[in-house]
Image (tube, helix red, strand yellow):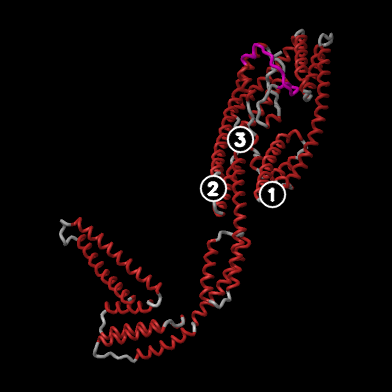
Amino acid sequence: MEMQDKLQEADGNKEENNKGCYLKKKTALGNEIPSKETNLEDKKKEVEADAEASVDPPQETAINYEDLDIDSLVKSFENLLKNEDVYAIRSQVNRIKKAFNTKFNSLLTTNKETFLAEGGNSIDFNFSSPHKKKFNTLSRSFRERNERFEKNRTLEYKKNLEARLQIIEEIKALIDVNQNSNTTYNAFKNLQEQWRNLGKVPAKDANNVWNNYRHHVERFYDFLHLDRDLRDRDYKYNLEKKQKLLKNAEALATEENLGRAFRELQALHKIWKDELGPVPKEYREKLWEQFAAATKVINDKRKVYNLQIEEELLANYKSKEILISEINEIANSEFKTHSDWQKQIKAIEQLRERFFKLGSVPKKLRNKSWTDFKSGVRMFNKNKNKFYKFLKKDQSENLKKKKELVEIALQNKDSEDFETTAVLIKNIQSQWKSIGHIPRKESNKLWKEFRAACNHFFDRYHQQKNAGTPEENEAFVQKEKLFETLRLFTKGDDKKTDINTLKTYSKQWADVGNVPKNKRQIDRDFSKSINSLLMDIGVSESEMKHLKYRNKLQEISKNSRALNNEIGFVKKKIEEIKSEMNQLENNLQFFSNVKDDNPMVADVKNKIESYKSQLMDWNQKLISIKKVVQ
């Protein structure tokens, strides 16, 4: 009998294929058998090793449960359970369970960290989720169905074992039976058909049953050799069928859908192995080599495809590692403001979205990738929660401080001591600005209350300022009278006398004091009239500047602070001008051999002359100040 032990079962191991694991040698019982070496085995090793090492395209590319959120995982689980075939969905259920547990544990950890960061006690932490309750219900339902399935399958395997043992006994009974060869042959074929239609047997019995079956099949063919006609007819039939299988296998080389090609190849192997018997000896080796070569073409393509898949998975892993690195960089950075943290929260969320949009990674790296990702996100959340815990404490203290300022503003908004209260209100406004953030829900309300109290006071303050004090109103009356006197002034023959008269008016005006704020236009009108009269008398622009400055000094002489500020300002200007002049004069040293009409030299000299003129003016102002001080 032609050795066919290493041909793969057409259906393969569905559960293992779904996981993308290597296929193993199977018998018609669907269980593993030991290899039996023959003279053909050595020539088949390479091809068969390829077939054994073939990997189905990873099924995870269809649905990557790691990319789904908790709600979607529960819905996917619920939809899967609508399938009556528990075996068909087992692999997907396991992947859903793994993804759900990973994400739920991450959610649980995050909530616990937040709870502890807010001051909670670990023993008091409790987290419930409707998704978790629903998922547990679905898991219980699947477990119960799976237990029933396993129990029924065990019974089915046991029945199959009994039926196969019975078939072996019936084949044994056909050997050495003294009856018509055709009748015996047909009975044998019928038993083979029954054998093929039976399902799997318990794994512990599979090898013995298969070896026993094969042994008695070989004995039957040895017995059948007594009737060469029947044997040759069987050989011819098997040869024709296997030649057709060979053509079909060779045609699969042009099939673009690699998954379909491999499934069809498995089906051809199953027919070759389970449904067809030996062929004439002169065809066996060549026919098998051709079929093995066609098998190798498909397996080689699958190898290339699987390598491409692995490269894609590895590329995904590397991309995810880059994202994890960015997450870790953010997680290990220090941010000091709410605004900064909000920006980083958005950045982390964008990185998370990009992470989940990337496809699967190699299985051996999957746990590492997910663990690294969770670790980075958890570290970020831990630091974020720590920041907001202290921020909450700071905001609570800031809230207390701002409420105190609001109380001060409310207590003083109707004060009649305007000048003292104005200083107080400005001071608490400055304090308000220096206090940090407070909880958002309190911020707007408290600010409006504080601003309203401050505005109320300053509205009253400005109203009072505009109306003026009794003294300011009296000063306005006196200035009106003095203005009338000025209007009666006429130019005389003596310029000096006229100037002194106008100086006297200016001094009297300054001595009267301030007028109400809303009536200060009279000061501007008086100043214009004085300037006009001085020009009419013939006073130069330079003299007018000095007169105006002396009038200014007369006004501020009553305020020592204002006078000291003016002295400091004038002295500073004098020093600045001297410094600029010295710098320019030093620069001229570099042009000692240059003619005076050189444009650059001329420009420097013009600037020096301008500074000299300015220096004279400021020195004159300083002299005027000293006279006032004396």
Instruction: Classify the position of the N terminus by image quarter.
Output: top right
CA distance for labels 2 and 3: 26 Å
CA distance for labels 1 and 3: 31 Å
Residue 549 appears anywhere in the view: no
Q: Is residue 565 magenta?
A: no
Query: Does dot 3 land on a helix, a strand or a loop?
Result: helix
Instruction: Classify the position of the C terminus by image quarter.
Output: bottom left
Q: Is residue 222 above or below residue 356?
A: above
In the rendered image, which residue does mark 2 sit on? 334
The crowd level at tag 3 (other Cα within 10 Å; few <14, some 14-19, many 20+) is: few
Q: Earlier in the sequence, mark 1 or mark 3?
A: 1
Q: Verify CB contact (< 8 Å) between mark 2 and mark 3.
A: no
Q: Amino acid at mark 1?
A: Gly
Of the numbered discs in the image, which one, if any, rests on residue 368? 3
Q: Verify CB contact (< 8 Å) between mark 1 and mark 3.
A: no
Of the numbered discs in the image, which one, if any, rests on residue 120? 1
Specify the principal SS of the magenta part: loop
Q: Earlier in the sequence, mark 2 or mark 3?
A: 2
Q: Is residue 41 magenta?
A: yes
Taking depth in this image into account, of 206 and 585 the one nearest to the observer is 585
Query: Measuring 75% from the left and 33% from the top, which residue is drawn there?
Result: 87
**Farthest top residue?**
226
Q: Position of residue 25 (x, y in %)?
A: 69, 21
Q: Position of residue 525 (x, y in %)?
A: 38, 84
Front tag of 2 and 1: 1
**Left or right: 61, with 525 as reference point:** right
